[in-house]
Amino acid sequence: MTTIAQSTVPLAVNSRDAAPEEVVRFENVGLRYGLGPEVLQDVTFSLPAGSFHFLVGPSGAGKSSLLKLMYLALAPTRGLITLFGRDIATTPRRALPALRRRIGVVFQEFRLLSHLSTFDNVALPLRVAGNREEEVRRHVTELLGWVGLRDHMHARPPTLSGGQQQRIAIARAVIARPRLLLADEPTGNIDDRLAMRLMHLFVELNKLGTTVVVATHNESMVERMGFPVLRLDADPDELGVRVTRRPSMATPEDEAARIADAFEVPAGSRPKRA
Ligand SMILES: Nc1ncnc2c1ncn2[C@@H]1O[C@H](COP(=O)(O)OP(=O)(O)OP(=O)(O)O)[C@@H](O)[C@H]1O
Ligand SMILES: [Mg+2]
């Protein structure tokens, strides 16, 4: 397997403001879906800029829900969330898309745009950020090569395997070097060897300054990599996440409509076909 040195990581470099010291802060955050019970209770933690955390906990513990709060797809029912130093509750709605664009997300269910090619899915964040097409082409081609998808650049996601789609989702999340990367079970469909290669991409991104949170069930990967762990369960963990989970009978709602929201693609900068 190829290992990568920091200088060879094929990630686009964007200019950015000085990073705040604390990228995320949750204080006594609670979340309920509709009129259901609270699925997250009294969640308190903070993520220093440049940190790397795993987020673990049993299925249904609320890992995806916690990440959704962090990427602003959901608002908490109670408590305080600050993102990049801003209190989300008092941040005007019009300012939220700009905050979201600083966040790269690998969705548990990928959420690729099925009418676009692999190339265009990955190019999306760079195009939205206004990069020149020549630069977009260079970065996307390089990164797709790195994740082993160069031969599938023109394929549409529905024609690819689960692991291939997951790699597109990962490439799309990291391509623009977000300040905060939230990955929800990003290696669930990929063999261990490839999983470690992709985790190295996250590690290299982290070395370049991105704050990273990876939700995973893969305990051996967590152990092997040795990063601090945010644990969602009944007991407070060493980092102060404190969650009491109550059983919920609610079924997850369809969140496909949030894709466009997550990427906030302005009408004028819709991607062209590769
Ligand atoms: N859209 C939704 N509407 C209602 N309840 C929801 C919704 N999404 C999640 N839940 C509930 O919230 C709880 C936490 O779900 P979540 O998806 O955050 O767990 P998870 O830790 O990510 O699980 P997994 O490891 O299986 O991905 C569950 O009880 C689930 O039923
Ligand atoms: Mg989940």
Image: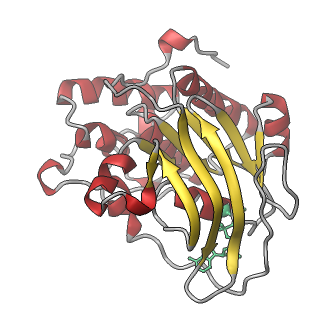
Closest to the observer, 207 or 272: 207
The image quarter containing residue 40 is: bottom right
Tell me what residue is drawn at x 56 percent, y 74 percent: 77
In the image, residue 187 lies at what x, y percent?
A: 66, 45
- Residue 109 in percent (x, y) is at 55, 61
State whether residue 184 is above or below residue 154.
below
Q: Nearer the viewer, residue 163 or 126?
A: 126
Is residue 158 visible in the rendered image? The answer is no
- Spot the residue most to the right: 235
Rendered position, 80 above or below 82: below
Of the 4 image quadrants, the one containing the N terminus is: top right
Res. 141 visible in picture: yes
- Name the residue at 19% across, 54% down: 266
Residue plotted at (37% across, 38% down): 153
Q: Quarter of the image holding residue 265?
A: bottom left
- Residue 204: quadrant of the picture: top right
Would you say 22 lies left or right of 117 here? right
